[in-house]
Image (cartoon, rainbow, N blue to C red):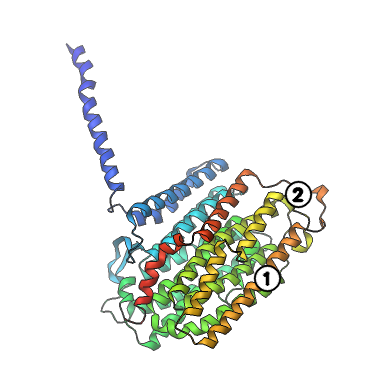
Amino acid sequence: MWFFVYRQKPVLEKPILVFQVRVFVAQVYLVFTTNSFPWSTTFVLLPISAGCLIFFFPHKGNKIIRWYTISICILELLLMTYAFSYYFQLDDPLIQLVEDYKWIDFLDFDWRLGIDGLSLGPILLTGFITTLATLAARPVTRDSRLFHFLMLAMYSGQIGLFASQDLLLFFIMWELELIPVYLLLSMWGGKKRLYSATKFILYTAGSSIFLLMAALGLALYAFNEPTFNFEKSANQSYPVSLEILFYIGFLVAFAVKSPIIPFHTWLPDTHGEAHYSTCMLLAGILLKMGAYGLIRINMELLPHAHSLFSPWLVIVGAIQIIYAALTSSGQRNLKKRIAYSSVSHMGFIIIGICSISDMGLNGAVLQIISHGFIGAALFFLAGTSYDRIHLVYLDEMGGMATLMPKIFTMFSVLSLASLALPGMSGFVAELIVFLGIITGQKYLLMPKILITFVMAVGMILTPIYLLSMLRQMFYGYKLFDAANSYFFDSGPREFFVSICLLLPVIGIGLFPDFVFSLAVEKVSAILSNYFNR
């Protein structure tokens, strides 16, 4: 009898177990298919939380650590794509996927996250570039655990900044990504890495003081209780003199990060010494944080001061295009030449933001995305070239086209994209900025003609330094000893990364409406309420 009972017990428990599993699966399904799931918090915390587990991996398990990090980046990107496809309404200019959790009641400081059309593009760009940068970092084998943890920590900081709806949280995320960049530069950089890392942290951390002071002033003014809430600050009016002070504080911080001349000198040194996977993150994402801050805070929260400063910033942007293009032409170091090219292209973003026109601001947003892909691609190709010839000075190169035809082809195509070849994303972005400054109602006819002329001169100078770079690298005689060098063309991994960066450049150039659709409603909302607060 007891044998019969023993044989029947599993049979009785099996339906219960199956029922419990089905209930659990149904609960998980409901969580992931409803808006109640904390998507924004997941995007911010997943990379750094998963990164902490890396330190439990074997010290010499470089391959395992590398594939684990790449898997986390891909998972994050897939989750973002899924959430934005099903739960984000592109025609809604309001903040979506909002999460608000109490943190410090005394300061009204909340874990307040949300995503709108303005932050959607940079967030997707961050996921895409970080995934490819992690794949590009395969040659890094020294202290692999720390390196990949820092990559994931940067990932969280950048996503957190673009999703922040709280000024103090914005500042924390702004600071969070500085430490990983400093360590990545000082530990895996070139010969002058300590000098470059010190210069980077002095510029960026020093400018962060202005960001903190301006954020505190904005939070403490005109409220019975201090608040860092973006939404409340956006509905608050300030005396013009006070608004100007706040604007200057934020402007200094964002001008260093963008960079805007004369706060740009840290950038060429940093790019010149950093590992190319770090350069991809710097050029593709880090610089765009400054431009994003100008739109999100200076333009949206402080419109009167922005209206006063815009004419001067347009002049600075035009000067920056010419100055950086001329300086780039004189650079012998390949990565520094590309770095000054980035500074020049940031001038178009500044002009687009300060045009105070629908077309100009949309062009600036498009240029942020476009240059993120192009800048990351050029630094990646510069790094892969260095891996083969171990030369950084252009006058020591030459004749590489026949030895590395794939790298030559990709370098040529992406350089043409950088100089705004029609059919590429750079052409569409710069054209829209042109039209924005010309058709805008903010400026008189003669200033618009002068600014447009200067921008056109900058576009003429861009092919000079980029085509000269290609000529020195790939054409002419071999200026180095090829017999003692180990040459091999782009491998599958490197070719895959290059193609992944090239396809969006071509896709946006041919179908820019996709990027415009992300932010067009938010841009219209910013400009429609610009002078009506």
Q: Is residue 480 left or right of residue 142?
A: right
Q: What amino acid type should be assigned to the residue bearing mark 2?
A: Leu
Q: How far apart are marks 1 and 2 (CA)?
A: 26 Å
* Callout 1 secondary element: helix
Question: Is residue 455 at least partly visible in the picture?
Answer: yes
The foreground one among 342 and 42 is 342
Q: Which of the marked residues, 1 or 2, is nearer the chain's N terminus?
A: 1
Task: Identify the disc placed on residue 328.
Answer: 1
The residue tagged 2 is 403
Residue 263, image x, y percentages: 57, 76
The N terminus is located in which quarter? top left
Question: Alpha-carbon neighbours of circle 1 within 10 Å: few (<14), some, or many (≥20)?
Answer: many
Question: Alpha-carbon neighbours of circle 2 within 10 Å: few (<14), some, or many (≥20)?
Answer: some
Q: In this view, does 339 lie above or below 483?
A: below
Q: Is residue 533 left or right of residue 57?
A: left
The residue at the point 29 percent across, 62 percent down is 100
Q: In this view, does 390 lie above or below 290?
A: above
Q: In this view, does 216 lie above or below 384?
A: below
Residue 509, image x, y percentages: 53, 61
